[in-house]
């Protein structure tokens, strides 16, 4: 039982109220994002101090963001799934599969006259895989972890068969020009990441879809008994995550100018790590797109600093691990103050 | 009947008290158990029986009072301490581990081992002996417990108690999961145990069973012992019911408003049933009427509400709203037809505790606050605020987290949700659970106001007094079977209990 009774209408005494205000700012999404912004600034300072101009020059900055874009797009879809209390382990494999299907000889031949076909195919493959995940999870009542683990394994195998385990080079000129191009000095891939993030933010914070997602993650049974069609919504969520995997698939195809079954291996873990570091609760019910974007940038700036300084990738992995643990520890502090425990 | 030696009590409970966050669950319980007796503890839901059991099993430490075990004052610091004294508890939700075998379950926590190596054969031999003593030589010690029926799981739970040196077994509604044949076996086993001098505390709602197996009765009401050590044989049923229910009736219920003769029928339930949960039942509720479902826990009350609401698929029958059938087994369909439910477990089924009030208020209708897919949160907030003000929820701040509110205010948020949605039929399951006495009167008067405004209401409560105080008509139910539909003025609480006890005795 809560000890905040209905009759306590008087305001709290001065000092308590002040500290409560500070706490509520720190507890709000904006407050948690401030922590991430500070972390990012610290990393940028470290990068500037250790590598100077090699780190701060515009080309390096664009490289960081360009490399961040692919997992970034995955992480946006993942944010929705995790806010609803689910998980999607299959996105890396689905990314690989969509890159392979989009670069099949037959598809490329057809795309010779209409290059956007490659994008459409990749998106369709991702969406289809997501819909299958969604049906199995929502209507088959299979735990999301297992259903998407199965898809992770199967999609990779399917991609290997289709590509015959070879790397398929992209020869469609229009597509190469598009993916290698830039607009206002910003590469296409980065634009895609920006657009997906912006769309994700609006979808989460301003639409009925986002509200349903948060409600289901906050209390699935209450959402169901309030009249929300929870199963159908879960299907949509995994379809959305599959779609972002398809987008990421075509982005990586463009960046590497090839499609292969090994594309995207372990990307799902980078995406999940960024989402969690970004302050989205793994148990669902709370999350933030801005946090996810900051999480992605933190990890990619970190990688860049290590690369610039010719540091061992193993040390880099250890640092990443430490960041995840610290972020989750901070998250638990917030979860412990959760009203549910009162 | 066993002759009871009243001279030397095995366990005495003296003035035990226990509070949770300032709410007293036990206000002074006295109980005296002698070896070899079956001592029944009677009381209504919420009287404090479960708390008492947990004090005896060591799950809770009492705040005050004394426990005297075989003449010595003791402190039961935990479940292990209770077992060491010789007190075993069989909970209603049987605490057996499904994935382990019968023998592994029985010796769980005191495994027979030789320097860490399990003595499997010895365990099986002793399990076999205990099962035989319990009248079940047919059960194999190596069988997995998950594959057993509830009745046999109960046997395993009992065997676990017997694998230790136990003097007292506490059984919490052991017959609730059993059919009549299995109850007979249970009673046979209980008699065997008491013959050996083991005492049993037997908790049940079923008066007929208490008459058959019990020796003495202690009645608890509102956390206090109201009568202890009554002889089963010489205490009339009427006296027991008075002892259980005879609280000082506070007149908190607002007066009923007469329903206009031309009030339209809002809900009609025809032949509705869920197999194994409740039998086919039919009733109708008119606009402005409050219809109550009275029965004990497990009678199927809540399931009836949830089936009307579409959360369960019915085996037979239909639900009609204003004469048209509602698609069965679909909550969205029910909500679209103007049915609202305030569920039994408000915190786990009704509200999203960490989210703001306004989001909980608009949860069933936020689509209405959207242009296309884009939500107008300003409109949501102002609508919620207006609703909170009209329900006198103070402060009417739509941005507070629902989890910070008191039980009464959380209930108001649930009501606000359906008022914002605009429901014709409101299903209220335990509307005052977790609501303190002061706020109850307020909730009652809100319910009355809603019905006076033309909403049809169906109310379920484990407090029969509440159902009778609120409802115009009541349906009395026991074990899924409709016993009667009566005018609420024509029956009182003992009358309902009498009907229920008779109904479940059959």
Image (cartoon, coloured by chain):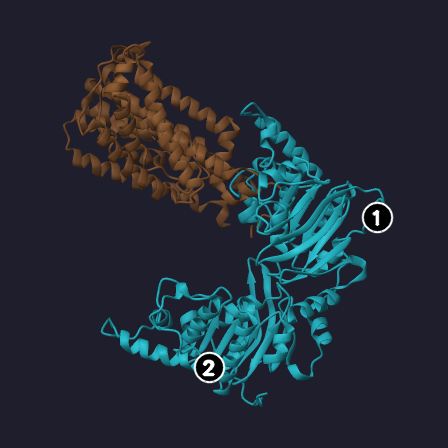
Chain colours: A brown, B cyan
Tell me the residue that label 1 is attached to.
B258
Describe residue A318's horizontal placement relative to residue B275 as left or right. left
Asked if A261 appears above or below B300 in the picture, the reply is above
Q: How many marks?
A: 2
Q: Are marks 2 and 1 on the same chain?
A: yes
Q: Nearer the viewer, mark 2 or mark 1?
A: 1
Find residue B167 and name its label: 2
Residue situated furthest right in the rendering: B261
Quadrant assignment for the N terminus of chain B: bottom right
How far across and how far down the image is residue B96, in percent?
42, 66
User: Which quarter of the picture shows residue B83?
Assistant: bottom left
- The first of marks 2 and 1 along the sequence is 2
Find residue B210 and name its label: none
Q: Residues within 10 Å of mark 2 (few under 14, many from 20)?
A: many
How far across and how far down the image is residue B494, in percent?
74, 67
Q: Residues within 10 Å of mark 1 (few under 14, many from 20)?
A: few
Give the residue drawn at x 49%, y 31%. A210
Question: Which chain letter matches label 1?
Answer: B
How far across and how far down the image is residue A132, in percent?
38, 35
Asked if A319 appears above or below A127 in the picture, the reply is below
How far across and how far down the image is residue A73, in percent?
34, 26
Quadrant assignment for the C terminus of chain B: bottom right
Question: Which chain letter matches label 2?
Answer: B
């Amino acid at each position: 039982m809560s000890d905040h009774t209905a009759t306590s209408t008087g305001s709290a005494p001065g000092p308590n109220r002040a500290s409560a205000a500070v706490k509520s700012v720190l507890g709000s999404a904006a407050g948690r994002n401030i922590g991430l912004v500070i972390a990012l600034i610290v990393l940028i300072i470290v990068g500037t101090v250790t590598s100077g101009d090699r780190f701060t020059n515009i080309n390096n900055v664009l490289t960081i963001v360009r490399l961040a874009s692919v997992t970034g797009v995955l992480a946006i879809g993942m944010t929705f799934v995790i806010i609803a209390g689910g998980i999607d382990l299959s996105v890396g494999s689905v990314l690989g599969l969509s890159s392979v299907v989009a670069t099949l000889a037959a598809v490329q031949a057809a795309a010779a006259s209409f290059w956007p076909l490659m994008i459409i195919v990749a998106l369709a493959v991702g969406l289809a895989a997501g819909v299958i995940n969604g049906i199995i999870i929502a209507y088959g009542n299979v735990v999301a972890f297992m259903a998407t683990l199965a898809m992770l394994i199967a999609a990779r195998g399917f991609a290997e068969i289709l590509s015959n385990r070879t790397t398929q080079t992209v020869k469609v000129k229009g597509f190469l020009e598009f993916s290698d191009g830039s607009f206002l000095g910003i590469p296409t891939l980065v634009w895609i990441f920006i657009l997906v993030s912006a769309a994700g933010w609006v979808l989460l914070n301003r639409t009925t879809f986002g509200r349903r997602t948060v409600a289901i993650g906050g209390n699935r049974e209450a959402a169901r008994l309030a009249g929300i069609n929870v199963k159908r919504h879960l299907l949509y969520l995994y379809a959305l995550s599959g779609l972002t995997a398809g987008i990421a698939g075509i982005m990586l195809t463009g960046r590497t100018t090839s499609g292969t079954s090994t594309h995207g291996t372990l990307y799902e873990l980078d995406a999940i790590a960024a989402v969690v570091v970004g302050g989205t609760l793994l148990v669902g019910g709370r999350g933030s797109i801005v946090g996810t974007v900051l999480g992605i940038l933190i990890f990619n700036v970190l990688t860049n600093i290590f690369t610039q300084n010719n540091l061992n990738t193993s040390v880099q992995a250890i640092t990443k691990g430490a960041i995840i643990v610290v972020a989750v520890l901070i998250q638990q502090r917030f979860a412990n103050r959760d009203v549910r425990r009162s | 009947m066993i002759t009871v030696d009243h001279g030397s009590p095995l366990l005495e409970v003296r003035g035990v008290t226990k509070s949770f966050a300032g709410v007293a669950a036990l206000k002074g319980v006295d109980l005296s158990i002698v070896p070899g007796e079956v001592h029944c503890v009677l009381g209504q839901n919420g009287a404090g029986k479960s708390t008492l059991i947990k004090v005896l099993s060591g799950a809770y430490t009492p705040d005050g009072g004394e426990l005297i075990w075989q003449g010595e004052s003791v402190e039961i610091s935990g479940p292990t301490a209770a077992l060491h004294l010789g007190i075993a508890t069989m909970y209603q939700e049987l605490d057996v581990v499904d994935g382990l075998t019968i023998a592994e379950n029985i010796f769980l926590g005191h495994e027979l081992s030789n320097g860490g190596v399990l003595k499997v054969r010895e365990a099986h031999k002793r399990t076999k002996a205990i099962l035989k003593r319990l009248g079940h030589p047919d059960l194999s010690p190596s069988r997995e417990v998950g594959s057993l029926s509830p009745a046999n799981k109960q046997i395993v739970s009992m065997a676990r108690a017997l694998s230790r040196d136990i003097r007292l077994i506490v059984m919490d509604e052991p017959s609730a999961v059993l059919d009549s044949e299995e109850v007979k076996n249970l009673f046979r086993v209980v008699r065997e145990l008491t013959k050996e001098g083991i005492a049993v505390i037997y908790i049940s709602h079923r008066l007929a069973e208490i008459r058959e197996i019990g020796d003495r009765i202690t009645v608890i009401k509102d956390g206090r012992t109201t009568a202890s050590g009554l002889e089963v044989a010489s205490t009339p049923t009427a006296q027991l019911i008075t002892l259980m229910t005879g609280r000082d009736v506070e007149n908190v219920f607002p007066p009923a408003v007469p329903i206009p003769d031309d009030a339209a029928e809002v809900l009609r339930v025809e032949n509705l049933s869920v197999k194994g949960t409740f039998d086919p039942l039919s009733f109708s509720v008119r606009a402005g009427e409050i219809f109550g479902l009275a029965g004990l826990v497990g009678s199927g009350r809540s399931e009836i509400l949830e089936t009307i609401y579409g959360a369960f698929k019915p085996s037979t029958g239909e639900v009609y709203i204003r004469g048209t059938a509602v698609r069965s087994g679909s909550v969205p369909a029910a909500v679209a037809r103007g049915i609202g439910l305030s569920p039994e477990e408000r915190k786990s089924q009704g509200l999203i505790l960490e989210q703001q009030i306004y989001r909980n208020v608009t949860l069933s209708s936020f689509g209405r606050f959207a242009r296309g897919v884009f939500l107008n949160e300003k409109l949501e907030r102002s609508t919620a605020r207006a609703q909170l003000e009209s329900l006198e929820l103070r402060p009417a701040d739509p941005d507070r987290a629902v989890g910070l509110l008191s039980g009464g205010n959380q209930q108001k948020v649930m009501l606000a949700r359906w008022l914002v949605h605009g429901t014709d039929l409101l299903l209220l399951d335990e509307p005052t659970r977790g609501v303190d006495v002061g706020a109850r009167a307020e909730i009652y008067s809100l319910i009355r106001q809603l019905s006076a405004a033309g909403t049809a209401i169906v109310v379920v409560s484990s407090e029969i007094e509440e159902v009778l105080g609120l409802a115009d008509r009541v349906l009395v139910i026991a074990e899924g079977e409709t016993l009667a539909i009566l005018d609420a003025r024509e029956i009182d609480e003992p009358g309902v209990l009498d009907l229920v006890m008779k109904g479940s005795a059959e």
